Image (tube, coloured by chain):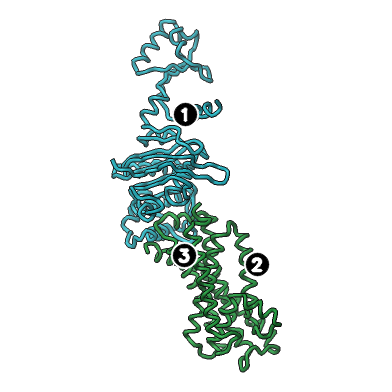
Amino acid sequence: MSLAVEVRGVEKRYGSVQALAGISLEVHAGEFFALLGPNGAGKTTLISALGGLARADAGSLAVMGHDVTRDFREARRAVGIVPQEIVFDPFFTVRETLEIQSGYFGLRRNGAWIDELLERLALANKANANMRALSGGMKRRVMVAQALVHRPPVIVLDEPTAGVDVELRQTLWSFIRSLNAAGHTILLTTHYLEEAQQLCSRIAMMKEGRIVALDSTANLLASFSERVLRVKLANGTLPEALAAVATSEAGGAWRIPIQDIAHVEDALARLRAAGIEIASLEVAEPELEEVFVKIMHAERVEKAA
Amino acid sequence: MTGFPTLLYKEVLRFWKVSFQTVAAPVLTTLLYLLVFAHALAAHVQAFPGVTYVEFLIPGLAMMAMLQNSFANSSSSLIQSKITGNIVFILLPPMAAGEIFAAYLLASMVRGLTVGTGVFAATLWLIPLPVPNVPWLIGFAVAGCGMLGTMGIIAGIWSEKFDQLAAFQNFLVMPLTFLAGVFYSMHSLPPFWQAVSRLNPFFYAIDGFRYAFFGHSDVPPWESLAIATAAFAALSWLTLALLRRGYKLRH
């Protein structure tokens, strides 16, 4: 399988801050990949290094096999980056912005693709509006379009849904999903972990400039999270067999891990047998948020030790 | 040469969209200088023999406006892009340092030359000047606007906030332009200040530009052109080195 993004031993220091402390990472062509981590973990620095906005102190980065410094033209042609901050040029309209961005990539007659981008991102009726006149969410959509004018095989989205309304989030993800289905590699950072869980097949978690977890979404969920039965009792106490595995949660609910749905039956039967009435009941599927919290916490403990 | 034509187009369009501020206003300011100084000084100053003070003043003022506007174009465009953050849209595409340099420089020169043309267009029908020597005229216009366009790129890259750019402009560019012999002939100065003036590269651009009209100058035109061009070349070399290193642009 060919590599869309290849990061080898990348280090980057800003003054006294070690932003990247030896990152190695491979993203395969066609993957939908998430880069997660708390603020300050180095995600944006890594993306900046990938796009040539920052220079690595050590190590190498390549996009579609093109080194980002030695072969910078081909590398930059291969990647479209949507920056995290909303930025725009107030001198131009939406269409001018996209035509100019196309021109920077040497694309002169890009009108048909620009029209399609405007259509897909629900910007068609704003094509001739000045950038200043757009809402934040619309500016964000223009930035997505700007990153895609040159049809890059690798698309990098740095927190694309921060502060974005539900409708736009859905429009954006359906578009990005269709691009992924058409063969584009997607690299995404987000703080909305349920988005990453739904969309991404593989996940890297970063902390303090290092990768602390890297696996398929399914494996991460299986190893760090579990399906649980969450019950609140109306009376009585939890039977011993269940109490041995259960943990209590804030609000008085019990959290009982269950391997599969058959175990739910089993747990309920035990409660019935003990004559306990149930006030509320919920089956919770494994959550990436739990994985994230556990991994970040484990890191902290390891550091403290 | 992938993005250069578009970046040049965008930089020209950027100032053209606000041409009241970027072209018409400097032309008007220059005319006001002309009006005021010509009235105040015409009776007292005879800079060149056979040339009235108003005539003497026009090429110098035109060149001053050209220098200032060439500087203003690249410097303000870069600082605005840096502060608003939209510089990323120029840094992410596959453009080499040379392309970025050439686009910002040429757009600055276009602005400087447009303002200069405006100054002449507004004055010539009132105060006709001798027909200029075109090669000298173009040579000094290009060297002067180029020198300042390049300085504008350096200032725009170096400045991190508007205050620093204003300092660059007011403490370096303004004194150098005002003390470059726009309003007087260098020969009217005491020897010490003549020597100081000769260290100012802007002086050669103005002196030589005036030579194109009157065939008379403080310094031989070849010498002026050589010095102005050398300054332009040195600044270009420095700017290209900064852009290649990504100084303050690619962290």
Q: Chain of mark 3?
A: B
Q: Amino acid at mark 3?
A: Phe
Q: Chain of mark 1?
A: A
> Any idea which chain is the green one in this picture?
B
Q: Earlier in the sequence, mark 3 or mark 2?
A: 3
Amino acid bearing label 1? Ile
Pointer 3 with pointer 2, Cβ within 8 A: no
Q: Position of residue A258 (x, y in %)?
A: 39, 17
Q: Is residue B26 visible?
A: yes
**Residue at coordinates 42% horizontally, 52% vertically from top-left?**
A142
Report x, y in % for residue A104.
39, 60
The answer to which image quadrant residue B221 occupies is bottom right
> On the image, numbered disc 2 is attached to which residue?
B171
SS for tag 3? helix
Residue A36 in which image quadrant: top left
* Residue at the bottom extreme, as displayed: B50
- Compared to residue A131, the image places residue A275 above or below, namely above
Q: Residue tagged by mark 1?
A: A295
